[in-house]
Amino acid sequence: MTLHLRRQPPITIWPCRFIEERPEMHDANQSPTGWYMASYIIRFIEISDPLRDDPEALCYAWENTILVKAESLSHAFSRIPALVCPDSTPYKGGSEGVDGKWGFVGVTELLPIYEEFQDGSELWYREHENHSLKALLGMVKSFEDLHRRPET
């Protein structure tokens, strides 16, 4: 089936194999593989900044996603800070060489990985309820939108 929307190139909708071949259901909080996907936020803390602990002050931050090997969801959650900020020793950061360090802010997402790793394995999902096809197509990015560096 091909859809044609205004100002959009034709888009081909492919049947999804996972809809027809539903995997067995698992406990939503337990990974049968022992792997969890975790996203978290860290921020750069300028040591000499008097506003460094002000919750309203602006700062530089990253949200990252990692894989965590753990026995349970709670075990994975407890491991994240040590995995992402094992050493909080200050260093000279940025173009001005400011004394600073990365500080763990918190976890934003933690999901069990249900399938063993192989090409095409599902690592993460997000449900989108009550969206029109037009809204879903608006979320889709082209290769050019995703491409960040020259291919080698």
Image (cartoon, rainbow, N blue to C red):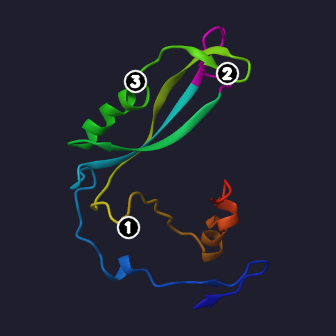
Residue under pointer 3: 86
Q: Tell me which numbered mark, 1 or 3, is placed earlier along the sequence.
A: 3
In the rendered image, which quarter is residue 133 located in? bottom right
Residue under the point 62% across and 65% down: 139
Q: Tell me which numbered mark, 2 or 3, is placed earlier along the sequence.
A: 2
User: Dot 3, crowdedness within 10 Å: few (<14), some or many (≥20)?
Assistant: few
Please state which of residues 91 and 128 is positioned toward the viewer in this rendering.
91
Residue under the point 46% across and 62% down: 127
Discs 2, 1 touching: Cβ within 8 Å? no
C-alpha separation, residue under disc 1 versus residue under disc 3: 31 Å
Question: In this rendering, would 85 be left or right of 114?
Answer: right
In the rendered image, which quarter is residue 147 located in? bottom right
Please state which of residues 85 and 107 is positioned toward the viewer in this rendering.
85
- Residue 17 pos. (x, y %): 38, 80
Question: In this rendering, would 101 be left or right of 86?
Answer: right
Residue 42 higher or lower than 146, as above or below: above
Q: Which residues are magenta?
A: 44-59
Question: In this rendering, would 89 be left or right of 149?
Answer: left
Residue under pointer 2: 57
Report the amino acid beneath label 2.
Answer: Ala
Q: Tell me which numbered mark, 2 or 1, is placed earlier along the sequence.
A: 2
Residue under pointer 1: 119
In the rendered image, which quarter is residue 77 located in? top left
Mark 2 lies on a secondary structure that is loop
Looking at the rendered image, the quarter that the C terminus falls into is bottom right
Mark 3 lies on a secondary structure that is loop
